Image (tube, rainbow, N blue to C red):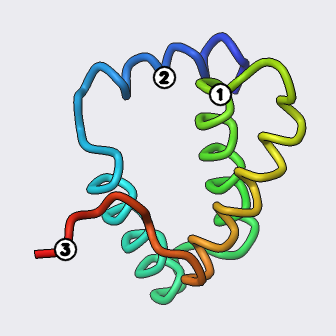
Amino acid sequence: MEEREEKRLHDSVRMVGLRATVTAVGFLTLVSELTRAGVLDEPAVGRIKEAVVKEITLGGPTVGRDEYERTIRQRIDRLFAGEQRLEGVPVT
């Protein structure tokens, strides 16, 4: 996807108004279930993670962008591996 299309998608997702943590939890669960069911393979999960990293970095800083992207990529890898919790999710 071209950066222009990525930016358009980014803006569209932000306009929907969904809470990011709710969406992220559902998304991570969906990817996990589809992987477990054999619908998604590792290359597909890699492409999904790359799309998430690009989306996050579009809204990030322009100065220090490479380091920011590296940090985001590491966090996304840990989230998909179940090694990191999503922050900001209220406990009830």
Q: Which residue is mark 2?
A: 9
The disc, 1 or 3, on the residue closer to the chain's N-terminal end is 1
Q: Earlier in the sequence, mark 3 or mark 2?
A: 2
Amino acid carrying label 3: it is Val
Furthest residue to the left? 92
Secondary structure under tag 2 reads: helix
Q: What residue would you read off at disc 1? A: 60
Q: Residue at x 44, y 17 (%)?
A: 11
Left or right of 26? Residue 35 is right
Camera-near label (3 vs 2) is 3
The mark closer to the camera, 1 or 3, is 3
Residue 72: % across, % down: 70, 50
Residue at image location 71% in from the left, 17% down from the top: 3
Task: Answer whether labels 3 and 2 touch (C-beta < 8 Å).
Answer: no
Q: Nearer the viewer, residue 73 or 10?
A: 73
Q: Look at mark 3 in the image and give the residue it sits on.
A: 91
